[in-house]
């Protein structure tokens, strides 16, 4: 059975999309706490991140993503689902908007932490947190990636 035009478009976008690097900073101090140049957007794998546990003490975290896209995207969006031991804990949505074909872009988002009384310790979270990221162009699902987080 032939792929639909939407499936073909999603495949083209995914083939031309690359996450070049990403970092997490303490949003208050601006200090980089973790960074990676692995393409964490690549589907079909469970990626791993070893993040300093002190990030859990931050009131706000700045996430900076640098990505390249060969294809035009009219409305790039991310939907992230954070699972703990397979159960959905949180869901976050981020909108980037229009992406110029053949461009490299940097996208910064601020993530607010839960109140300290609601935070679980790193020893409980480590290896048990899975972040599922769905990449969309408008309502078209382009791809899904998974990241297991270890707190070190």
Image (spheres, rainbow, N blue to C red):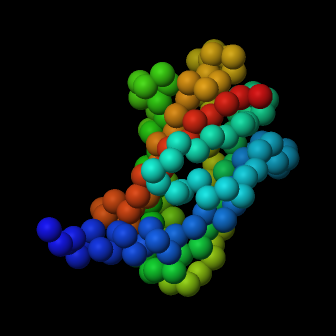
The answer to whether 23 appears left or right of 47 in the picture is right
Q: Is residue 130 visible?
A: yes
Task: From the viewer's side, name the closer residue of 152 and 1.
Answer: 1
Q: Which quarter of the rendering shows the C terminus?
A: top right
The residue lying furthest to the front in this view is 1
Position of 74 relative to 110 (above/below) = below
The residue lying furthest to the left in this view is 1
Task: From the viewer's side, name the closer residue of 76 and 143.
Answer: 143
**Residue displayed at 72% across by 37% down:** 50
**Residue displayed at 52% across by 70% down:** 17
Position of 75 relative to 110 (above/below) = below
Quarter location, residue 6: bottom left
> Residue 25: x, y in percent?
76, 46
**Residue displayed at 45% across by 80% down:** 72
> Residue 37: x, y in percent?
72, 58
The total number of labels drawn is 0
Quarter location, residue 105: bottom right
> Residue 133: x, y in percent?
47, 48
The answer to whether 41 appears left or right of 152 in the picture is left
Position of 93 relative to 20 (above/below) = above
**Residue displayed at 65% across by 24% down:** 126
Position of 111 relative to 38 (above/below) = above
Q: Which quarter of the rendering shows the N terminus?
A: bottom left
> Residue 78: x, y in percent?
46, 55
The answer to whether 6 appears left or right of 132 in the picture is left
Q: Is residue 98 visible?
A: no
């Amino acid at each position: 059975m032939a792929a639909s035009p939407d499936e073909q478009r999603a495949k083209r976008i995914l083939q031309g999309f690359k996450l070049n690097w990403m970092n997490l900073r303490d949003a208050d101090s601006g200090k980089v706490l973790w960074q990676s140049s692995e393409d964490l957007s690549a589907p079909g794998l469970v990626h791993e991140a070893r993040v300093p546990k002190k990030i859990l003490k931050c009131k706000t975290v700045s996430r900076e993503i640098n990505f390249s896209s060969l294809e035009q995207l009219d409305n790039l969006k991310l939907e992230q689902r954070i699972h703990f031991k397979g159960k959905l804990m949180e869901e976050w949505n981020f909108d980037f908007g229009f992406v110029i074909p053949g461009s490299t872009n940097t996208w910064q988002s601020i993530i607010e932490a839960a109140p300290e009384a609601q935070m679980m310790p790193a020893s409980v979270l480590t290896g048990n947190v899975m972040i599922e990221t769905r990449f969309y162009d408008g309502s078209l699902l382009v791809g899904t990636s998974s990241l297991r987080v270890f707190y070190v």
